[in-house]
Image: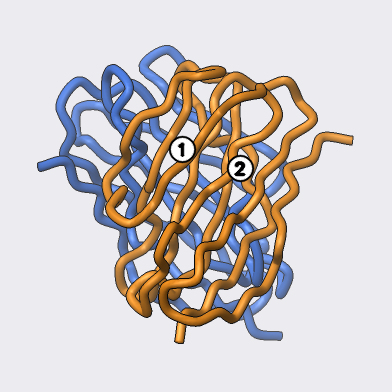
Amino acid sequence: EDKVVQSPLSLVVHEGDTVTLNCSYEVTNFRSLLWYKQEKKAPTFLFMLTSSGIEKKSGRLSSILDKKELSSILNITATQTGDSAIYLCAVLNSGNTPLVFGKGTRLSVIA
Amino acid sequence: EAQVTQNPRYLITVTGKKLTVTCSQNMNHEYMSWYRQDPGLGLRQIYYSMNVEVTDKGDVPEGYKVSRKEKRNFPLILESPSPNQTSLYFCATGQGGLGREQYFGPGTRLTVT
C-alpha cells in the first residue's frame, strides 16, 4: 500500500530559526512529490519535485528530493510567525491514482 | 484572478437530507477532485475527474456522487448524508500531469446531525 510519512508531527521554534521538515514515501512508480502549506484554510501549493527537478527554492523556502532515499525535505530559513502552519507532503503515483498525502507537520513559530 | 469557489462554506444538516456542494474554477483546468479532511486521517480523495464527462473514484467514494457536465464545475452530491460524513471538504483543480492538485478551494465545513 502506498504510504507517505512526515516527521516531525509537530514542531515549535523561535522566530529566526531554521527548520527542516521531512517527508518519506513508499509508492510504486513515483512520478512527483508536492509540498503544500495549510494555514486556517485551504492548502496552498508550494513546490513540485520530479525526477527532472529535484531541487526548488522560493525565498526562504527550499525543497530537495532524494530519489535514492525516497524522501524529501522542506527547509525554511529565518522563520517568521507567518510561517506557522501545517505543511503537507503528497506523492503522485503512476497513472490516474489519487495523490497520497502525509498527515502533515504542524509548525509553530513563536516570537 | 485564478479562483476556485465552493458553496456553501458552512452547512449543518440532518441525516438523510440530500445536499450538493458546488465547486467552480475559472482557470480552464481539466483536472478537478474532491477531498475530505478529518483529524488524524489527513486529506483523502473522494472522487476526481480528468475531463468533462470523465469521473472516477478516489480512496473514499462511498456515500458520494459527482458529475462533470462542464469543465468549470464539479459538484459533490450527498444523496443521503450520515453523521460519518461530517468533515471539512475541499475541491482541488489543476492542469493535470504531474502536479494535479495545484489549487484548492476554500473548503466547506459540513456537519450532519
Residue receiving disc 1? A34
The secondary element bearing badge 2 is classed as strand
* Residue type, label 1: Leu
Q: Are marks 2 and 1 in contact (CB under 8 Å)?
A: yes
Whether A66 is drawn above or below B22: the answer is above
- The N terminus of chain A: image quadrant: top left
Q: Are marks 2 and 1 on the same chain?
A: yes
Per the model, the C-alpha gap separating discs 2 and 1 is 8 Å
What chain is the orange one?
Answer: B
Nearer to the camera, B108 or A77:
B108
Tag 1 or tag 2, which sits nearer the N-term? 1
Residue B58 in the image: x percent, y percent? 32, 40
Quadrant of the rendered structure where residue B15 is? bottom left
Number of numbered discs overlaid on the protein picture: 2
* Residue type, label 2: Phe
Nearer to the camera, A26 or B68:
B68
* Residue farthest along the right direction in this orientation: B1
**Left or right, residue A33 beside residue A42:** left
Q: Chain of mark 1?
A: A
